[in-house]
Amino acid sequence: MIDESVLVRQNEDSEGQRVAVVGGGVVGCVVALRLASSGRRVTLFEAAPALGGLAAPWELGTLTWDRHYHVICESDANLRALLRDLDLEREIHWSSVRTGFFTGGKLHEFTSLRDFLAFPPLRMHEKLRLGAAIVYASRVKLDTLRRITAAKWLTQLCGRRVFAQIWEPLLRAKLGANAPNVAASFIAVTIRRMFGARTNSGGAGKGAERFGSVVGGYARILSVLREKLESAGVEIRTSTPIERISARGSGVDLIVNGASEAFEHAIVTAPVPVVAALIPELTETERARLSGVPYAGVVCASLLLDRPISPYYIMNITDHWVPFSAVIEFSNVTGIEQFAGKSLVYLPKYVATDDPLFAQDDEAIRHSFISALIRMIPGFDPAGVAAFRVSRVRNVFPFPIASAPYDPPAFATSLPGVTLATAAQIDDATLNVDRSIGLANAAANYLLNATPQGTSR
Ligand SMILES: Cc1cc2nc3c(=O)[nH]c(=O)nc-3n(C[C@H](O)[C@H](O)[C@H](O)COP(=O)(O)OP(=O)(O)OC[C@H]3O[C@@H](n4cnc5c(N)ncnc54)[C@H](O)[C@@H]3O)c2cc1C
């Protein structure tokens, strides 16, 4: 039996313990907040000049907004709880949004059941089969889907023609060259999240997706979160990339600018291939395992336009010649008033981490993306592009491979005093802020319940 008085004494001993959190994205910020609120002395290290990681804002012409599009789903319980803590939940602006589908050179509405039934590229029996498959995918047990590729599973469920017309292009759009290998669990989890955003009422009609966004975007969320971190006593060090982490007695040393700094414990929130390079003292097996986790990357253009280009939040694309994965017209969630009457559009292209697109300069990307918009959208005027900026991230989300069923890394690592809290621990990898916060909460609880030295053996 556990002696509770010992546990209480251990927790009291560990108060005041110095903990380093490496990475100031959503996970790092939330872990830091939870630990500091429980009495740990926390230093948060972020390589970039500001907090936020993938959710960080940047300047786009005259606008400060998220570098990557970020919507909130009504089912995002962890995120909404955090926003409640920050007194921001009431600032969420909710909208029912419309969806488009660009296929065979034409744009079709794909919002309601009626749109789905009228969708020209598929025959009626194919639509019924596709609809049944989507409902099934939203409910099926995930365990059964980790050893079969999404391609094989979706072909079995929907037939070859529907797979070739709809699923194959969508998988390629989300995963680039990695699409044929991804496990079916990945697509089932993605469908579940989209199902969670469906509504039976709302302006865009029955079945429309309902998304939210805090007025002011993640710039607003992160500035309130930063204040909360500071008032909880977290020391925030931005523009401070950690170069190496190594063992020191019962704690760890962090190497910053060539000098070392001692902590009782470190929690690392960077992508796992980065972790493997950062901690040479992990066992060889563990380093090989972490550096072998496959990630998808993204090249994502943001455009500020003089006028809207469509009524849709998302335009899915199946035509191979289009150089981006989707058109995300974010101002159809927020309203153009947030952007001084302009329309904010993202053109993401999801790619493998070594895709040649990473080497293309902004001008080349601008030319190919805008040429495609001219072909796709009747009346699109390139002179109306008020600002254009490109973000490139190689390690965005890890994804499960069917041939090697994935065993996510644990919080504990082979180096005592170092804990992992990173996207590769999120099952089936639908990366979103809600699941990132869930992971951060679990990692903080894990550490708070660990031994007084914080070792995770
Ligand atoms: C294009 C795109 C669209 C998205 N859309 C949505 C959406 O609509 N809704 C939603 O909920 N989520 C969305 N997400 C996902 C969301 O952004 C992530 O779930 C979340 O931001 C992940 O946070 P993280 O802390 O795990 O990782 P990251 O944000 O990657 O944070 C890791 C941090 O570690 C830092 N770091 C790395 N190495 C070091 C080092 N050596 N020293 C110090 N710091 C280091 C990095 O600079 C980074 O800031 C989207 C993401 C992308 C890319």
Image (spheres, grey):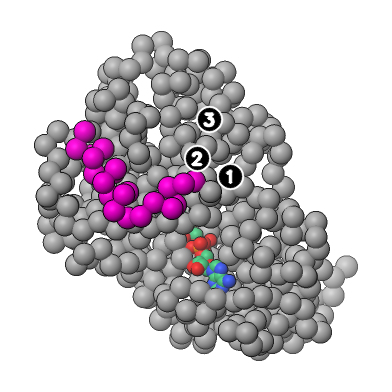
Residue 331: numbered disc: none
Q: Is residue 454 visible from the viewing direction of this image? A: no
Q: Secondary structure at mark 1?
A: loop
Q: Is residue 152 above or below residue 426?
A: above
Q: Crowdedness of circle 2 by 10 Å Cα count: few (<14), some, many (20+)?
A: many
Q: CA distance from mark 3 to mark 2?
A: 19 Å
x 46%, y 46%: residue: 356
The stretch drawn in magenta includes residue 158: no
Prevailing secondary structure of the magenta residues: helix
Q: Amino acid at mark 1?
A: Phe
Side of 381 relative to 292 (left or right): left
The quadrant of the picture occupied by the N terminus is bottom right
Query: Circle 2 is placed at which residue position?
Result: 175
Tell me the magenta residue range: 355-375
Question: Is 63 left or right of 188, judged from the image as shown?
Answer: left
How far across and down, in percent of the image, does residue 45 sit?
54, 78
Q: Which mark is residue 399?
A: 1
